[in-house]
Image: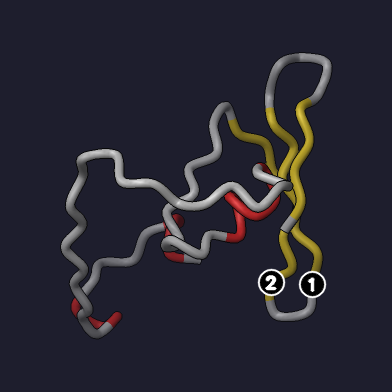
Amino acid sequence: MDYAENMHGNIDLTFQVEGEIKKTQADLIVGADGIRSVVRRHMVTDDTPLSYVGCIVILGICPLEKVDEHSLLD
């Protein structure tokens, strides 16, 4: 995963999906991949420790066949 802000103020994103490089653009990156986030690791380059911000997270797991198809699940 890689990203860079372009001259239009958007973010160019690059992913590797099943061995193929995919590119897209976004207005915002959300690091919702856990406390050891790949997005956080790219954005915070020093060893800043995690800190409590007053939020509680409840995780849920379900089989994918129970979730409707959506482009965000790619």
Q: Quadrant of the N terminus?
A: bottom right
Q: Residue at x 43, y 64 (%)?
A: 73
Q: CA distance from mark 1 to mark 2?
A: 5 Å
Residue 33 quadrant: bottom left
- From what the image shows, is residue 9 above or below residue 34? above
Q: Residue at x 60, y 34 (%)?
A: 26
Which disc number belongs to residue 7? none
Q: Position of residue 18 (x, y in %)?
A: 70, 80
Q: Amino acid at mark 2?
A: Val
- From what the image shows, is residue 30 above or below residue 41? above
Q: Position of residue 34 (x, y in %)?
A: 42, 63
Q: Amino acid at mark 1?
A: Glu
| Residue closest to the eye, 20 or 14 | 14
Q: Which residue is mark 2?
A: 17
- Label 2: how many Cα within 10 Å (few below 14, some 14–19, many 20+): few
- From what the image shows, is residue 48 above or below residue 25? below
Which disc number belongs to residue 20? 1
Q: Is residue 23 shown left or right of residue 68?
A: right
Residue 29 quadrant: top right
| Residue closest to the eye, 69 or 13 | 13
The reply to whether dot 1 and dot 2 touch (C-beta < 8 Å) is: yes
State how the image is colored: secondary structure
